[in-house]
Image (cartoon, helix red, strand yellow):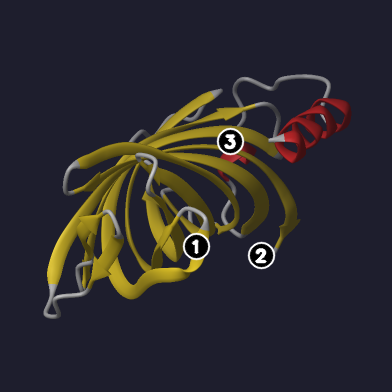
């Protein structure tokens, strides 16, 4: 979170004036980089818990209407007092801007795909764990708050569905993890907050 605050201060220093209405806010060919914080509501059998994390992303804009996000997230959440789950997401999303007129606030829809690495481990015993790899699809909506031509803050809410082997906690004393095999569906509701800056105009 400290890196996010420092980047925000850098944005304000480089861009002291907020430019509310300017078509260059949505120029095609822009390449931006950013940092993000994530909150996820994880449904894991008897545990409906929040997971928290951070990550990074870059955006490549194809047109005034279409943008793309390429992201990495690292999230962790507690399983009561017995263990911890760690999620790593690497993926991409297509962003679509439905409004023709651009301004300070710019809403968008998104849909995409990612790969997930999940590890569930026992507290105090790093040798007792189970992990899996899976693929997922996601969809949601977000909004940019343009601080200037090149800087923005973005808020996103999305639903992510994973397709992969399940991991069950079959015992809590002692802690026993089990992978029953086959394909199972697991979902997250994710919220993202990001700070982004345009570093290049590629075309």
User: Which numbered disc flags the more N-terminal residue, 2 or 1?
Assistant: 1
Picture layout, residue 179 above or below residue 90 = below
- Badge nearest the viewer, 2 or 1: 1
In the rendered view of the protein, which quadrant contains the N terminus?
top right
Crowding around mark 1 (Cα neighbors within 10 Å: few <14, some 14 to 19, many 20+) is few
Q: Which of the marked residues, 2 or 3, is nearer the chain's N terminus?
A: 3
The outermost residue toward the right is 13
- Residue where numbered disc 1 is placed: 125
Give the crowd class for mark 3: few <14, some 14-19, many >=20 residues within 10 Å: few
Instruction: Point out which mark residue 23 bears.
Output: 3
* Residue 133 in view: yes
- Could you tell me how far apart the alpha carbons at marks 3 and 1 are, in whole angstroms? 55 Å
Residue at image coords 44%, 65%: 91
Say which of marks 3 and 1 sits in front. Answer: 1
Residue 199 drawn above or below residue 167: above
> Vertical placement of 24 versus 148: above or below?
below
The vertical placement of 99 against 199, above or below, is above
**187 on left or right of 30:** left
Q: Residue at x 40, y 58 (%)?
A: 93
Q: Residue beneath label 2, please?
A: 203
Mark 2 element type: loop
Nearer-the-camera pick, 113 or 161? 161
């Amino acid at each position: 979170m400290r890196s996010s605050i420092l980047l925000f201060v850098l944005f304000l220093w480089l861009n002291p004036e907020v430019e509310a209405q300017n078509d260059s806010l949505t120029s095609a060919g822009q390449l931006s980089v950013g940092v993000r914080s994530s909150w996820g509501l994880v449904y894991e059998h008897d545990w409906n818990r929040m997971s928290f994390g951070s990550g990074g992303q870059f955006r490549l804009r194809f047109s005034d209407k279409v943008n793309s996000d390429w992201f990495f997230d690292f999230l962790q959440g507690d399983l009561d007092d017995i263990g911890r789950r760690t999620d790593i997401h690497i993926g991409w999303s297509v962003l679509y801007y439905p409004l023709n007129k651009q301004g300070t606030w710019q809403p968008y829809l998104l849909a995409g795909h990612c790969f997930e690495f999940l590890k569930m481990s026992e507290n105090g015993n790093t040798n007792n764990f189970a992990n899996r790899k899976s693929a997922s699809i996601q969809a949601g909506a977000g909004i940019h708050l343009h601080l200037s031509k090149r800087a923005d803050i973005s808020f996103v809410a999305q639903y992510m569905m994973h397709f992969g082997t399940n991991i069950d906690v079959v015992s809590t004393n002692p802690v026993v993890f089990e992978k029953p095999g086959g394909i199972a569906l697991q979902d997250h509701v994710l919220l993202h907050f990001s700070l982004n800056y345009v570093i290049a105009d590629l075309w």
